[in-house]
Image (cartoon, grey):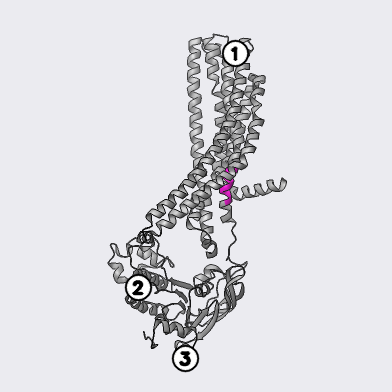
Amino acid sequence: MRQGLKAMMHRYGRLLQYPLRQWRTIIAILGLTAGTSVTATLQPWPMKILVDYALSQAALPPLVSSFGNFNVSLTPPLLVIVAALGSLGLYALNATLDTGLNWAWSAAGQGMVYELSQALFYRLQRLSLLFHSQRTVGDSLSRLTGDSYCVYTLVSAVLISPVQHLLMLFTISIVAWNLNSSLTLITLWVAPMMAGFALVFGSRLKRRTKLNREAQSRLTSFIHQTLTAIPMVQAFSRESYNTQQFKHLARSAVTISQRETLLKSTYGLANGSVTTVGNAVVLYVGGQQVLSGAMSVGSLLVFLAYLQSIQGAFRGLFGIYGSLKSVEANMDRVLEILDAKDGVQDAPGAKPLPLRAAFERGHICLEGVTFGYEAGYPVLEDITLEARPGETIALVGATGAGKSTLVSLIPRFFDPWQGRVLFDGVDVRGVQLNSLREQIALVLQEPFLLPLSVAQNIAYGRPGASQQEIVAAAKAAKADEFIRQLPQGYDTVLSERGAILSGGQKQRLAIARALLKDAPVLILDEPTSALDARTETLLLAALERLMQGRTVFIIAHRLSTILRADRIVVLEQGRVVEMGTHQELLTGSGLYKRLHSLQFPDPPQEVML
């Protein structure tokens, strides 16, 4: 029990750091909450003045009567005016305080949700590619935009609501006890039963809420996946199928949501039944006391108003447990991201890469590297490879041979299980990630373009680049001509994934981006495999310029792009089976020659660029 409570408080404490940054507003909220509690306690009293002293014309209490003798006689008509004005004044004061409270709570709540979302966004960007490969984008988006509101609910349930309800109970109970102690005791008896209902329904609410969030996440993920694959959906006429899938997922989400709503309604009904019985008992006992003269009608009306406030405070207090159980499902999803272990992170005391002369930069060594994505299933085994500054290393092999995995170790997207990767003689695990990745540029098979301007996409890896430098990089990548034909030229904002551009145009922008970054190491992961022969020919000239003076790792299924590589490394099932120049490998009878024969059939011919 103690361990469970300790663990729960630790989990809550992880998220409470975000509201603590809004401490000034939180203090203002607590002050306004105290003010609303006091005004709520005073609000029923004008009704007592009206009923007991104005309408029944009973004598005023001595203190009020003597106060009135100094000014004006408090006649029944005047008391009616006093009661009306008092009611209006207390309402106006309470409304003003309540408006201020809502404004302050909205400002603080949105602030803490924003800060938690920012932390989640940062963590999601830092987590390894392996982490993201195991989760859908829709699920991550759901956690970022939906589950992050758990901090708002948590602070409300742990801090704001308890203070508000306890202050209300404290002030009203004191006044109610002085008004009629027996009725106050009757009112308080419902508290244990409401607490019991909270305990019974709390765990069930958490489970239902978690199921509901997971169902919503599945639906969001499906929508995201479908909308990002619209060309394929339309090409294969899968609209009807996807609609049926959507209906199935939506129907499941609705069913789960209805069950959660039913459980919440049942919880509310149980509490409502208890409070209704309590109201009936108070009405009966209070009515008997009025008939016997032990209590005035005005006092009974005030007490009935207090009865509603006390029961509302109890419902709020015991509802906190249910709220916490409901929000725990969202907290679990948020903390799963915040607590996820970085597959790759800066080691303690990591230092920047040492500065070297331009002709010495980009010396890459892999020494006895073994790596896989799942324990016991290595993708690379005992890889030893060296690339000297300025060399071009081509990686060839069948799909799944480990080519992309190998180059992913260089910018340290993953760390090897065994062996090490050296950059300019330094183990990459001992240097700062940003320092390492600043020395590497990538051009991938699918160029990633963001919904920014063309100039911003080119300068993505070097935001401070001038317009002249951006244009120079575009010209070197053979992209300037088509860019100037766009509606706003370099200021044209691209649609998502650059849908208005052809595949070759997208690749040339990616090459321009790599040129502008001007990193000593370049990784080309099948940059032309998705292009036709004519577009490939246009890109090869741009690639030649990009590769000059850099250490290059190029993955290619088309052997025409790698004939001039300094060395060609042939991978098979995660191992290096051949290594040499194009001419050397053709003289042998290994895998490379077989691949070459498939692409340039009988008789094998060398293809000159």
Give the main secondary structure of the magenta stretch: helix
Depth check: 509 or 172 in front? Answer: 509
Residues at marks 1 and 2, CA–CA distance in whole angstroms: 91 Å
Which of the 4 image quadrants contains residue 26? top right
Cα–Cα span, label 2 and label 3: 42 Å
What amino acid type should be assigned to the residue bearing mark 1? Ser
Badge 1 crowding class, 10 Å Cα cut-off, few under 14, some 14 to 19, many 20 or more, is: some
Considering the image in quadrants, where does the N terminus appear? top right
Residue 417 inside the magenta-drawn segment: no
Q: Identify the disc placed on residue 296.
A: 1
Crowd around label 3: few <14 · some 14–19 · many ≥20 (10 Å): few
Q: Position of residue 228 (x, y in %)?
A: 41, 59
Q: Looking at the picture, does residue 328 appear above or below residue 579? A: above
Report the span colored magenta. 324-332
**Label located before the other in sequence (1 or 3):** 1
Would residue 569 be visible to someone looking at this image?
yes
